[in-house]
Amino acid sequence: MDSEYEQFDAVALAAQVARGDVSPAELLDAALERLDEVNPAINAVTQDHRELARRFVTDGLPRGPMHGVPFLIKDLYATITGTVTSNGSRFFDDNVADHDTEMVGRYRRAGLVLFGKTNTPEFGLTVTTEPRAFGAARNPWNVAFSTGGSSGGSAAAVAAGIVPVAHASDGGGSIRIPASCCGLFGLKPTRARNPAGPDRGDGWSGMSTEHVVSRSVRDSAALLDITRGPDIGAPYYAAHPRRSFLDEVGAEPGRLRIGVMDATADGVPVHPEVAQALRAAAALAENAGHAVEEVAPRFADESYGEAFRTIIGGNVAMTMHKHAARMRKPLAAEGFETITWLLATLGQQKSAMEYATAVQTMQRVGRSVGAFFTEFDVLMTPTMPDPPVPLGHFRMTTDDPGAEGPKLARATMFTSVFNASGNPAASLPLHWTADGLPVGVQIVGRYGDEATLFRLAAQFEAAQPWFRRRPAL
């Protein structure tokens, strides 16, 4: 089984377990063998819970739809009882959980075998995964390059074949950006499609949500079927879908009206390889019978960047202070990376009125995006304006923090606005550069309409298959 393990997605592995062709213990052994083989080179998994996983298997896993499939959890706010949730920070190295988050609980009840946690930048605050606490995650397509962030460890683990699908989260592009960098499918669901409890009502005032990165479209759909729906006491939730998301994969999408956006409204150009990827994707859509039209919508104004920083800074400050008070630890700048501390300081300095104003700014963005989707079914954009960058391009610990803002703004210029609006959005691995690095194309749907994205993504996957394309690592 070990040599065959990487050839299957999670849906196929679960089917093999259900037929009795392979056991959960055998799948776990195969995942651990692959982990031991490649993780020293890519540093994707920073917490190894293999003995805990073996106990799960020995004690008897729930007979859910993913019974026996190995799985990894991103080390950011997702707690597993008895293990550390570090949030990519040295300050949280004593943060041992006494409960599972609801998402982790739903993964467990589905029968997934949780055997480790994946690398993430400190507090998930950047678009690369190079935390001071754990060191850089490395891109399996070229280990000198970034995996993207903040779900970079999860993306590297999936791309390298440790698992077929892994937990991820996205507050400004953190599912879609690593998916783009690592050649994967990565869907950010509609706001509140998945639960955030029991410790939070939402993340970053509704901008952040959790899901997965995967090699197949159907794995993403199957995992969303497992986790979707509110938990007890949820402050709000997305409307229930008409049917299973897995049933949407392979269903006919109909003739869609697709707007193609190749630059921001400010006219900021993208890298030639990215432009090529978008043109090719638009041609694929036209060949499939969809109506494709170039568009240049302006979703946000000059107040957007400051509002984004205000919301994130406030949440970072709150997280720091809550843990410091609970553990009776002093807070000091040297305990954190430079940008993290600056954001927290900003968050403390902002008033309640400024925070409320920032939330209203984000809601205005949502109104603007919603208006676009009264005329179009899908928006297609680059996921990122550039191919993957070398490690060290983004620096959370730096003597020149002012230089990082423009770099981060450029990297997220096509992704973060849909965290503000809450719309579902996905990155598709449709292009590789001449140097062999992946480039993603983003598709965005109406609020609550993951179904159309799964249908369209599956159509692209059938027309230009990517599952068998693997890094040489």
Image (cartoon, helix red, strand yellow):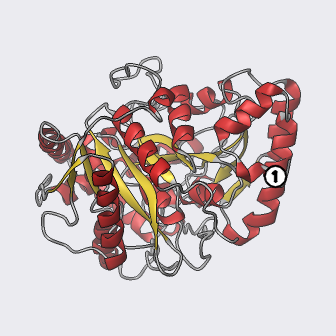
Q: Position of residue 456 (x, y in %)?
A: 37, 42
Q: Position of residue 217 (x, y in %)?
A: 51, 43
Q: Residues within 10 Å of mark 1 (few under 14, many from 20)?
A: many
Give the quarter of the figure containing the C terminus.
Answer: bottom right
Percent across and percent down for residue 438 are: 49, 68
Image side of residue 348 versus residue 399, left or right: left
Residue that appears at 31% across and 53% down? 287
Quarter of the image for residue 203 reads: top left
Residue 416 visible in the snapshot: no
x and y, in percent, of residue 297 in the image: 12, 55
User: Which residue is at the front of the view, 174 or 200?
Assistant: 174
In depth, the one of 5 and 81 nearer the eye is 5
Location of residue 226 with respect to 22 vertically, above or below: above
**Residue 127 lies in what quarter of the image?**
bottom left
Count of numbered tags: 1
What residue is at 83 percent from the left and 49 percent from the top? 30
Identify whether 466 is placed above or below 54.
below
- Which of 185 and 101 lies nearest the eye of the viewer? 185
Question: Which residue does the numbered mark 1 point to in the structure image?
Answer: 32
Which of the 4 image quarters holds residue 383? bottom left
Vertically, is 440 above or below 100? below
Amino acid beneath label 1: Leu
User: From the viewer's perspective, is 19 left or right of 310?
Assistant: right
Q: In the rendered image of this protein, does residue 51 appear above or below residue 64? A: below
Determine whether, in the image, residue 218 is placed left or right of residue 343. right
Q: Tell me the element at label 1.
A: helix
Residue at left 56%, top 48%?
Answer: 214
Q: Can residue 120 be seen?
A: yes
